[in-house]
Amino acid sequence: NKSQAERVYLPESPFIHNDLIASGRLTIVADVHALGAVYREPCVVFAGHPSLRFGPVLHFLRRWGSNPANALVLADPYWNKVGMDNAWPIMQPHHPVQMRVMFAPLDTRLSSAQAA
């Protein structure tokens, strides 16, 4: 909408991310081990690699996968979402996983006008 587009020219972020960071509701860390001081549940993990077999997501799945209040958001737009449930082939190595698993592709090809 027009008011959101006009916020781009203000000396503040037009996105909600900065507000979430300032309020402590969103934490960005460079390393899994940096979470110790800010860790709390429920948690939402955004996973970008379709295999879920390497990287920090393994630590998150082990640490938070048993709590159904936590969520895993599969953000890669190329994931095959056919048959999406907790028995997906990509989740099988991590069973039992009780956290909610959602498919929400982030399409980086969109322009700001298309995303609005």
Image (cartoon, rainbow, N blue to C red):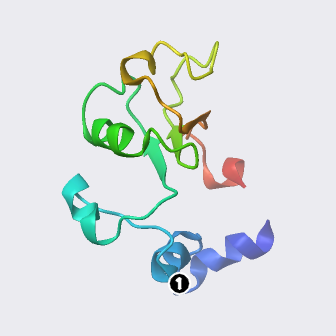
Name the quarter where the N terminus is drawn: bottom right
Q: Residue at x 48, y 30 (%)?
A: 97
Q: Can residue 103 be seen in this view?
A: yes
Image x and y of residue 23, in percent: 51, 81
Q: Are there few (<14), some (14-19), or many (20+) residues within 10 Å of tag 1?
A: few
Q: Residue at the spot x=55%, y=41% of the render? A: 106
Q: How many marks?
A: 1
From this view, report whether residue 67 is shown above or below residue 97: below
- Between 33 and 112, the one nearer to me in the picture: 33
Residue 105 x, y percent position in the rendering: 58, 36
Name the residue at the bottom extreme. Answer: 11
Residue 101 placement (x, y as % from top left): 57, 34
Q: Measured along the vertical axis of the image, is residue 70 above or below residue 28?
A: above
Label 1 SS: loop
Q: Residue at 57%, 23% (x, y): give it.
A: 86
* 70 shown above or below 51: below
Q: Which residue is drawn at 57% across and 42% down?
A: 68
| Residue 93, image quadrant | top left
Residue that label 1 marks: 12
Please state the horizontal and vertical placement of residue 70, each as a whole percent of the image: 53, 48
Q: In which quarter of the image is residue 87?
A: top right
Q: What residue type is labelled 1?
A: Glu
